[in-house]
Image (cartoon, rainbow, N blue to C red):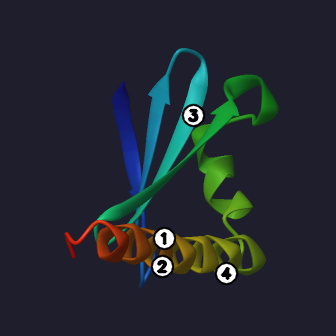
Amino acid sequence: MRFVHEIPHPHFRIGLYAWNNKYIVKIEAGPYEQTYKISEMDVTAPDDVPAMLDEPFLATVAQRFAQMDTDWQATGERNGIL
């Protein structure tokens, strides 16, 4: 996997990678990560990818991170770990 560039964002760390004819967007927040794969055929250049990360999409990403944290805390509590 080849690192292409970082996409600036105030709340998330967003990296763009290229691998196997796909662009991979990795969005990180704390200990959690979400990954999205985009076929190179679906965009004309890597510079098109940041435009796809609009506010409605990133708001959903933030909600998903919150749900991931809730799920993780709940399993930790059920199993006496967290």
Amino acid carrying mark 3 in the image = Tyr
Whole-angstrom CA distance, mark 4 to mark 2, is 17 Å
Q: Tell me which residue sits at (60%, 48%) in the image.
A: 47
Amino acid carrying mark 1 in the image = Asp
Choose between 41 and 74: the one closer to the eye: 74
Q: Earlier in the sequence, mark 4 or mark 2?
A: 4
Q: Earlier in the sequence, mark 1 or mark 3?
A: 3
Q: Residues within 10 Å of mark 3 (few under 14, many from 20)?
A: many
Q: Residues within 10 Å of mark 2 (few under 14, many from 20)?
A: few
> Looking at the picture, how far across and down is residue 72, in whole percent?
40, 69
**Pointers 3 and 4 in contact (C-beta within 8 Å):** no
Choose between 47 and 9: the one closer to the eye: 9
What residue does disc 4 label?
Answer: 59
What residue does disc 2 label?
Answer: 70
Q: Which quadrant holds residue 64? A: bottom right
**Pointers 4 and 1 in contact (C-beta within 8 Å):** no
> Looking at the picture, how far across and down is residue 7, in whole percent?
45, 62
Q: Tell whether 19 sits left or right of 29.
A: right
Choose between 30 and 7: the one closer to the eye: 30
Task: Kindly report which numbered mark, 3 or 4, lies closer to the viewer in this rendering.
Answer: 4
Q: Earlier in the sequence, mark 4 or mark 1?
A: 4
**Pointers 2 and 3 in contact (C-beta within 8 Å):** no
